[in-house]
Amino acid sequence: MIILPAMISILEASPSMINTLGAPIMVIGGLGLLFGVILAIASKVFEVKVDPRVEQISEALPGANCGACGMPGCAGYADAIVHGGEAVNKCAPGGAALAAKIAEIMGTVAGSTEQKIAVIHCTSGGTNNTKWKYAYQGIETCKAAVNIADGPNACSWGCVGYNDCERSCVFGAISIDEHGMRCIDPDKCTACGACVKACPRKLIDLVPINKTVYIKCSSKDKGPIAKQACGSTHPCIACGICAKNCPVNAITIEQNLAVIDYTKCINCGLCATKCPTKAILDLLAGCRKKAEIIAENCIGCALCAKNCPVKAISGELKQLHTIDSNLCIGCEVCVSKCRKQAIKMV
Amino acid sequence: MGYIGEIFVMAMTAIFIQNFVLARFLGLCPYLGVSKKLDSAFGMGMAVIFVMTLASAFAYLIQNYLLKPLGLDYLQTISFILTIAALVQFVEMVIQKNAPALYKSLGVYLPLITTNCAVLGVAILNTKAYRATDPTLAYNFLDSVLNGFFSGVGFTVVLLAMAGIRERLEFAEIPKSMKGMPIGLILAGIMALAFYGFMGFKI
């Protein structure tokens, strides 16, 4: 407030200053005004009519610009739907509800979308469960760290723990706990795939949300090496026990690593109980129901006993079968095999 | 040497001897940023040629009919930026309305180069340039426009060369830590050295 009167008094005192300042202010101000007016008129004259559906879809989209659809941002996707004939169900964050909404705008029917969730296939990478080769002091990103001598951690397949995935998540679904481990919030994760791309070790994968059994290791090293390098003592040593025990043959060993085929997996969790290194995580462990035979329906065909992966069912042919609830792991294989609906889960 | 010869010298100078990217080191950002794919490099190159030519023309008019008569040469930079930015915006609107196909191929790159230093550079250097055949004669309007055009061509030539090499680099066996930008910068250095060889030419 003091400056203004001071300036005015200076200007009054020296009229030459007004002359000096006047011309440049007039020129730049005039140019700015001229261009501004021209552009304002031009924006009206050269206005391009946009398809109103593009705007509607743009508004319906989450606006996170995560790129899960493969387009450069939400506006690009909206444009691609209207003009490029793109499918309406490619927005992972929006899910089925949004697909239906866009389909309504476009007047088409939405295809089904499978809800997925991101899973980190490694149990290492925290402050006290990682073995270090050397003390890394460079830029604190995974991308930079893994480039120096195959990364600072002993396992060249495992998590280095510089949280590139957490930074890449626009939905805040990845958090870091007190041990420096990354936790994925299933409610916030939209399976946009940003973290999958961000992880230089390719540890993250999108898994159907109704599957609860994950291989928590990505090491393709041979068993002994993997065991030595793993800081969390839960490496996959490619022993193949899970693959042998899987009742539906959903697990295969590929390049010294167990891989679950989620189109076959039935969530029985048997692999997790059999794994000698506890490299398989079963979210339902201990929460599964036990099988029980309904006496009046059982005809004693022994089909269930034959198929039980843990031999929990006993009983002779043509006699009532019994299930040892201590042995039963709740895989529900017998339920699907029984032709008389004589088994229920309690 | 007639005017055609003058134009030839100007073209050779702008494209090879005083190349904007590799000899003057202007416009390095798009040079490294948009040189990953040949077709996007081509789109960028066309946009730069277009904007450089127009910017040269308008900057010449502003400089000689507004700033010089008023003795306001020191406002050159700010008024050029203002002019170029407004011009690019205006041209973008016109193209979007009248030539949607051209807008699609240039569209993304046009706003990117609004305040590119190579575009501003050509406008400012034009005001200080003299003819090769007659060092007392400053560039006139046509000279400025042609120089802008050829500078844009020079930019496009090296951008396309860079993109071509980088497309092949995708399949080359490069040490992990050198992949991407590091090898791109080394490549730019080697190309600049190669263009340095043109420096001594006398046309």
Image (cartoon, coloured by chain):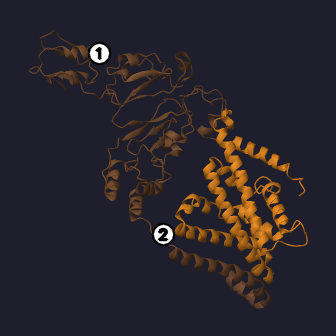
Chain colours: A brown, B orange
SS for tag 2? loop
| Residue A226 drawn above or below residue A7 | above
Q: Chain of mark 2?
A: A
Depth check: B80 or A65 in front?
A: B80
Task: Identify which amino acid the numbered label 2 is placed on.
Answer: Val
| Mark linked to residue B21 | none
Task: Identify which amino acid the numbered label 1 is placed on.
Answer: Val
Mark 1 closeness class: few <14, some 14–19, many ≥20 residues within 10 Å: some
| Residue B72 drawn above or below residue B26 | below
Q: Chain of mark 1?
A: A
Where on the picture, by quarter, is residue A307?
Answer: top left
Question: Which residue is at a point 72% across and 53% down the rendered structure image?
Answer: B157
Mark 2 closeness class: few <14, some 14–19, many ≥20 residues within 10 Å: some
Q: Which residue is under mark 2?
A: A48
Toward the left, the furthest residue is A296
Residue B73 spot, x, y in % from top left: 80, 76
Toward the top, the furthest residue is A316
Mark positioned earlier in the residue sequence (1 or 2): 2
Depth check: B157 or A200 in front?
A: B157
Q: CA distance from mark 1 to mark 2?
A: 69 Å
Where on the picture, by quarter, is residue A139?
Answer: top right
Residue B78 spot, x, y in % from top left: 72, 72
Q: Which residue is under mark 1?
A: A310
Question: Which residue is at a point 77% across and 72% down the rendered structure image?
Answer: B142
Q: Does residue A97 appear to the left or right of A6 in the view shown?
A: left
- Which quarter of the rendering shows the C terminus of chain A? top left
| Residue A132 drawn above or below residue B97 | above
